Image (cartoon, rainbow, N blue to C red):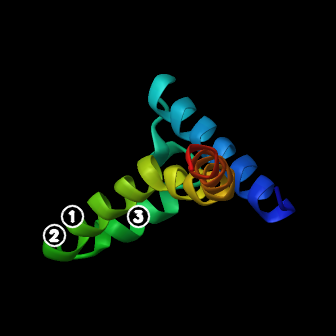
Amino acid sequence: MKRIHALLLVLGGSWLAVVLWVVLSNVIPRETHLGIIALILDKLPAAVGVPLFVLFWTVFLLGWAVLVGFGLRPILRTRIGGLAKHQD
């Protein structure tokens, strides 16, 4: 496994840990450093602010899966390729 894939797995796992911490500990992101983003979204019209809010939360909650997916990709490719060779 290359270093970049290991780094992607570590970053994805760290991101997931932060997401779980926010969700399970009932942290109010507005009271953290993310409050700056909330202030900016509050100043935008609702037609723009609400979709951006939903987009940001979706990326925050599910973005870790992209990093983990790209980190696991070579591992899964090697195992699936190895299984295909053994079946021939």
Helix, strand or loop for disc 1: helix
The residue singled out by tag 3 in the image is 39
Q: Is residue 83 above or below residue 40?
A: above
The residue singled out by tag 2 in the image is 46
Q: Nearer the viewer, mark 3 or mark 1?
A: 1
Residue drawn at x 38%, y 61% as measured from the top left: 56
Residue drawn at x 51%, y 63% as measured from the top left: 36
Real-space Cα separation, disc 3 to disc 1, in angstroms: 13 Å
Helix, strand or loop for disc 3: helix
User: Left or right: 83 with respect to 63?
Assistant: right
Residue drawn at x 61%, y 50% as measured from the top left: 76
Residue drawn at x 63%, y 44% as measured from the top left: 86
Specify the farthest residue to the front: 88
The residue singled out by tag 1 in the image is 50
In the rendered image, which quarter is residue 23 located in? Answer: top left
Answer whether labels 1 and 2 touch (C-beta < 8 Å).
Answer: yes
Mark 2: amino acid: Ala
In the rendered image, which quarter is residue 42 located in? Answer: bottom left
Mark 1: amino acid: Val
